[in-house]
Amino acid sequence: MSLKELFPAYPLTLRTPRNSKIRFGSRDLYVDLPWQAYYFLQVAMSKSQESDLTTKEVREEWQKFLQDNKESLTYHGKAIISVSLRYTSFSEKPFLRLDVKWDLFMRYLEEKAILFSSEIDKNGENIMNVYREIWMNFFTMSGETTPFSIEYVHSISASERFKKLLKRTGDDLYLENLLDRFEEIIRWVQERIKNKIPSVQLYTTNLMMSIHNMRALIGIVDIPAAYYILRNLLENFVKVFVYVDIGRNIDPDVVLISMFFYEYEMNNVRELRLYSFKKFRDRLVKIFTKIKETISPENPPSLNEFINKLKEKHLPILRINEKVLTDFSESYSLNIGLGNLYSACSAIIHNQPPLPFFSLLEVKYFKNFLEKYMQVLKEMAEKLVDEKIELKEIPALSLLRDKLFPKECLQVAYLLEIHNGTEVKEEIKEALIVLQDKKAEV
């Protein structure tokens, strides 16, 4: 299937007015395609009701419109869309045709996603700008405010086509590779700590399950729900960091295992929730130290007995918010924007349900966000263990085999990008797309 066939469209179509002298040759309204292109088609159709349009007139008006809207309709000076008036022997009426230069449009969306993702470095809540862009593009294009049909939103065919599109663009593989690196970071922390602190595996198991759940959500393209998993993962990793670090001067294994079960038992006690990293750290050290002083080495308490002692002391439970993460970052000299990542995830959780249509811009934005997040997690892990992480590279694939599958080609492109920049990857992706399109035509 071609990119045109795979690309998602809104559940709306352009309708030619009755008794019109021309007709719409392009009826689909593609998601994320700049609304200005469809505005031009509608204006041209309105003009045709008043006077005859010529091919030359449409071409000249389009070129002028393109110059006036080049920020929205071009990528590095090249038009991503063309509009023309065509004639065919099969139809009595000429038709307005919209052609998308799909390779340029893919680059256009990638760059747009990168620009939007850079905005969260200033303020995490800027993440909503990308959804504002997606929604405004739809409403400005269609003028429709009626609800979508559930049948369309949950259409299996639309879902399958979009998944094929993500495979074609390489975004699905890129996301898989990022999640592989997430797992690698968690396993790396576990392997460095578990011999001295076996109970760390309680936490790393939960972290690995979070990544597993995120794979499932990405698999059904439920991107907003994936942000919930990311926020939860960040909260839990910060707690692991705090418990391991503070526990080094007490008994890290006791701290981790007791806090793991203590939180389950006392999580609903609102009075114990504390949104202050420094106060929590001081209270935890003080309470654990006092309890430790009362314990006889010959007769250590059971886990339940120890947890009861924590209850008696009213040990608070650390709750995470942007302020806590800011204090945490300052305490450990981590200038990595934890607060912005957290507030970005929170903004999506509180404000954005799944979109009623598939958006490649949404996926590409999430991909860039996930990469930023992965780098932050990596730096936290390195700080915790005081060692640099050497992430495994994707196994190299031979380019000399008689046949390489598309997914393998994209893996090679990903490897080349790591060492040579994005240009090499883009060239390989474009070549692969051309080959697949030719094969489809045959």
Image (cartoon, rainbow, N blue to C red):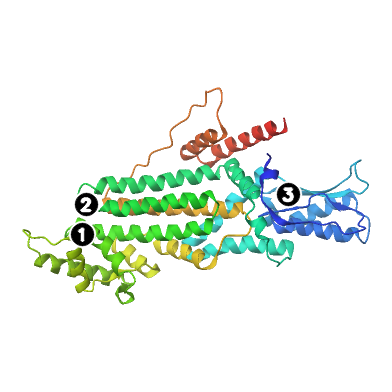
Residue receiving disc 2 = 197
Question: Helix, strand, or loop for circle 3?
Answer: strand
Question: Helix, strand, or loop for circle 1?
Answer: helix
Q: Residues within 10 Å of mark 1 (few under 14, many from 20)?
A: some
Residue receiving disc 3 = 81
276 over 19 or under it: above or below: below
Coordinates of residue 238 in the picture (x, y in percent)? 33, 60
294 over 181 or under it: above or below: below
275 and 198: which is toward the camera = 198
> Is 139 placed left or right of 253 in the picture?
right
How much space separates mark 2 and mark 1, taking CA atoms? 10 Å
Residue receiving disc 1 = 247
Among the two numbered marks 2 and 1 on one chain, the one whose residue lies closer to the N terminus: 2
Question: Helix, strand, or loop for circle 2?
Answer: loop
Q: Is residue 234 visible?
A: yes
Disc 2 vs disc 3: which is toward the camera? 2
